[in-house]
Image: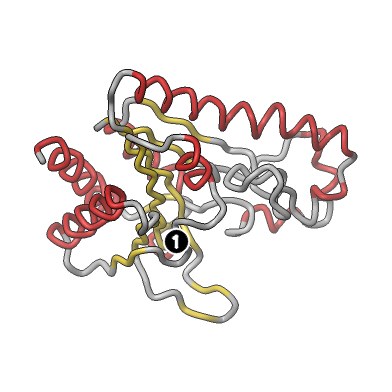
Amino acid sequence: MKLILTCEHGGNQIPKAYSPYFEGNEPVLNTHRGYDIGALEVFTYLKPLSVNSYYSETSRLLIELNRSVHHKDLFSEFSKKLPLSDKKHLIENYYSIYRLAVEKSIKNAIENTETVLHISVHTFTPILNNQDRICDVGILYDSRIQDEKMFAKHLKSEINQINPSYKVRFNYPYLGKMDGFTTHLRKHFKTNYLGVELEINQKFSTKNTLNNSLKSCLYMAIENSIKEWGEK
């Protein structure tokens, strides 16, 4: 099994040409709406486990890399105002370039008879709409796919063995089969592809840096799960 690591919401950058569309609303870029706080730092920590890794630091409020190209939320309330020519430019030069690079990497590995584990690193805000989200780590996968279900169980078990205090939940705070990059890739690669989204509670992040104990736990748990998979 070869790990390909991605981070679609690693930053809150807005290219200068598009900054006028956020004028007066710049503070939102520093919130969980602008990017996944702490996700890029976790991604960087886990990177040595992967054979290939890809990340974006462009804010999801400009273009949402984790949605299908026809999804209503591909552009936010700020970027929906852009002219069609600018939207086309963003799709071609940010969205497609990123996603096609990941697809090519997966395709090459599968053609070399490898099984690909794709982990997409995300974080989530601990409170949404005044509701506490009771979870430390979410493992998102498609429960209809036996291999993904099996790997998710391995990963949860490994995390809990390393540190039983962490509350790990399956398909929380989102469902793994919702519209997203892994969902698209499952349709594209019918065999030898496992798509897992790792969702980490932002309560463990301080100044965009995640708690070292949790990072270490996740590293060991993923490493052990990949090793177990190779031995099965």
Viewer-closest of 29 and 154: 154
Q: Position of residue 208 (x, y in %)?
A: 47, 51
Viewer-closest of 146 and 29: 146
Q: In which quarter of the image is the C terminus?
A: top left
The residue drawn where x is 73% and y is 54% is 72
Q: Identity of the amino acid at label 1?
A: Gln
Q: Where is residue 53 in the image (x, y as percent from the top left)?
A: 41, 30
Q: Name the residue under label 1.
A: 202
Viewer-closest of 222 and 125: 222
Q: In this view, does 51 lie to the left or right of 10?
A: left
Q: Is residue 105 left or right of residue 49?
A: right
Q: Where is residue 113 in the image (x, y as percent from the top left)?
A: 28, 22
The residue drawn where x is 72% and y is 45% is 62
SS at badge 1: helix
Q: Position of residue 104 (x, y in %)?
A: 48, 23
Against 189, residue 173 (above or below) is below
